[in-house]
């Protein structure tokens, strides 16, 4: 018969296991576009790790259609932001790894996707 250890252990008590926030997880998993509803990373926040053709559609998340006022791109990637759904309308290239405000394009973004 095998000798089974019935002792339970909290995940966070295991050495080298730690909780990470959404931003850190997105960075580790390949990068993300982070949008905020207010200038200078204030207000509601949305993490995007893959193309989103309609920022207002996703269930269970804050509607970001024509809401984004600031952004940050992680891992030095480039993203395209569009004023229309399904990657239509005016296109803006987002590539800075620092926090940026949309400025004149504030509250106009409806879809986004990563640029190869």
Image (cartoon, helix red, strand yellow):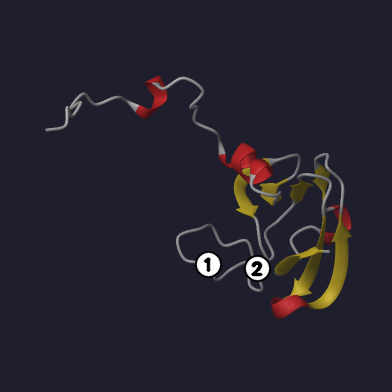
Element on which disc 1 rests: loop
Which residue is at the far front?
A: 1
Name the residue rendered at 68%, 42% in the picture. 27
Q: Nearer the viewer, residue 37 or 50?
A: 50
Residue 44 drawn at (x, y percent): 59, 47
Horizontal side of residue 99 vs 33, given as left or right? right
Name the residue rendered at 69%, 65% in the picture. 66
Horizontal side of residue 51 vs 81, given as left or right? left
- Point out the tag, 1 or 2, that comes first from the N-terminus: 2
Name the residue rendered at 62%, 61% in the picture. 64
Crowd class of label 2 (few under 14; some 14 to 19; many from 20; radius 10 Å): some
Crowd class of label 1 (few under 14; some 14 to 19; many from 20; radius 10 Å): few
Image mark for residue 27 = none
Residue 65 drawn at (x, y percent): 65, 66
Q: Is residue 65 visible?
A: yes
Horizontal side of residue 76 vs 12, given as left or right? right
Residue 87 drawn at (x, y percent): 76, 76
Dot 1 and dot 2 residues touching (CB under 8 Å): yes
Image mark for residue 58 = 1
Which residue is at the far left?
A: 1
The picture quadrant where one finds residue 90 is: bottom right
Q: Nearer the viewer, residue 11 or 71?
A: 11
Q: Is residue 109 visible?
A: no
Residue 86 drawn at (x, y percent): 70, 79
Instruction: Please determine whether, in this image, residue 40 is positioned above or below residue 46.
Output: above
Q: Nearer the viewer, residue 40 or 57?
A: 57
Name the residue rendered at 83%, 64% in the picture. 116
Residue at the spot of label 2: 52
């Amino acid at each position: 018969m095998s000798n089974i250890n019935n002792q339970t252990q909290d995940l966070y008590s295991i050495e080298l296991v730690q909780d990470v926030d959404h931003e850190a997880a997105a960075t580790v998993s390949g990068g993300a576009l982070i949008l905020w509803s207010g200038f200078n990373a204030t207000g509601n926040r949305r993490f995007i790790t893959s193309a989103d053709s309609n920022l207002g559609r996703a269930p269970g998340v804050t509607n970001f259609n024509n809401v984004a006022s600031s952004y940050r791109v992680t891992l030095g990637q480039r993203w395209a932001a569009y004023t229309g759904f399904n990657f239509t309308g005016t296109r803006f290239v987002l590539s800075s790894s620092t926090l940026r405000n949309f400025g004149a394009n504030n509250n106009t973004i409806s879809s986004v996707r990563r640029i190869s």
